[in-house]
Amino acid sequence: MRTAATATRRRALRIMGAGAAALVAAPWARWASSAPRTEADADILIGQSCQLSGPLAPLTREIQEGAGWCFEQVNAKGGVHGRKLRVVALDDAYDPQRTADNVRLLIEKHGVFALFNLAGTPTTLAALPVVREHKVPLVAPFTGTDALRSGFDRYVFNVRAGYADEIEKIVQHLAVLGIDRVGVAYLDNAFGTGGLDAVKGAAARRGVALAAATPLAVDGSGLRASAQDLARARPPVIVLATAGKVTSDFIAAYSSSGASAQFYALSVVSSQQLIQALGDRSKGVAIAQVMPYPWGSATRLARELSDLAGRKGVEAGYNHMEGFVSARVLVEGLQQAGPSPTRESLVRGLEGLRELDLGGYVVRFSDRNHNGSSHVELTIVGASKRVLR
């Protein structure tokens, strides 16, 4: 255990206090050897295990930036009840065991007040036993897995809609268009297989046949063979239960096979990264979205996010919006938890939000419901290589 904990402590650590992430060197080493922080300490310390390295790192970075802008804004105004927010993020590289180790370290060694934006389905599921053991609130995990939504968990608060909601919307749309056959490309892990099961269920309810399904290696190996395998079935539409670079690489491999299809991706795909990676081949790719449209001025949220991003010289996207919205929900829960918050008062504070309108996005929590939203809309990459509604 000592060896595992030591290895975990040596992994990349980032602290997002005033919004920007910064690597911590010697000061962190001294702090790690001291006694764990308590809920009564001056700063409110939030823990996160996510992908700071590997193929999903660019996606995580966008979420962190969006959340960081919110925390920076709150801290600049004096924090929550006079206490500043700090986020300690440990790298798990999308390795479930590392996530579980990180979460235990964040709770037992760092004394974090709550966990926030854990990223990924297999990684978050691996952390759940530790979360439940220590009764630490987990706010806004970046996953839509049904495993976090089908049963009530007192310490898990989902902000985004689930993957089943996204896939239901996609298949419903296809049925209206008269599409009666679909293919599925899915990551060969809990996230991907859960997406495949959701497609099977939604398709069966609407008389849509599953033409073929092919698993994709998480590390992106063997994509050409997988694309050729799926291409043999010639499905007119392919639903992608994928995330990160594998998504754009698979679309490129499938296009190179000589076959054609309309691609439908889930919200965990970064539209900006997809467009950058595929260029003209991104045109026509449809993407389900679970957050408000981040561009323009249609909602107060979009205006706020655009303003904050503009000050940083960044063009905000859907993942920035998700990080920003998630952080806003956490801050509102902390406000409700009172000037001397505890983990239990944060749980009650989040449940007490009832119906929180953030300015274009509504989150509903109660003591019987911790699934904040089922909002899904479909977007498409247009000829101008911009995401259109």
Image (spheres, helix red, strand yellow):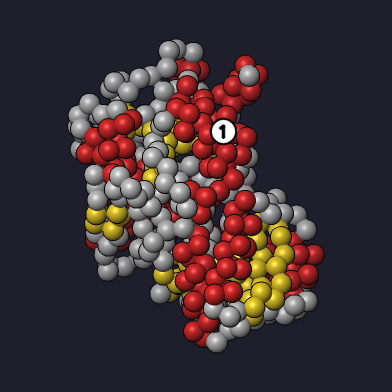
Instruction: Please give the count of numbered marks on the rendered protein.
Output: 1
- The amino acid type of the residue labelled 1 equals Ala
Q: Is residue 83 above or below residue 291?
A: above
In which quadrant will I find the N terminus?
top right
| Res 125 quadrant in image | top right
Is residue 295 in view? yes
Residue 170 placed where, x, y %?
51, 72
Q: Which residue is mark 1?
A: 100
Task: Pick the residue in front: 315 or 6.
Answer: 6
**Residue under the image location 49 percent in, 69 percent down:** 168
**Residue under the image location 33 percent in, 30 percent down:** 343
**Residue under the image location 45 percent in, 46 percent down:** 141
Answer few, some or many: residues within 10 Å of disc 1's Cα (few below 14, many 20 plus, some between 14 and 19). Answer: many
**Residue under the image location 78 percent in, 69 percent down:** 229
Residue 357 placed where, x, y %?
24, 57
Residue 35 placed where, x, y %?
43, 13
Residue 355 placed where, x, y %?
24, 54
* Left or right of 234 on screen, residue 1: left
* Left or right of 120 on screen, residue 76: left
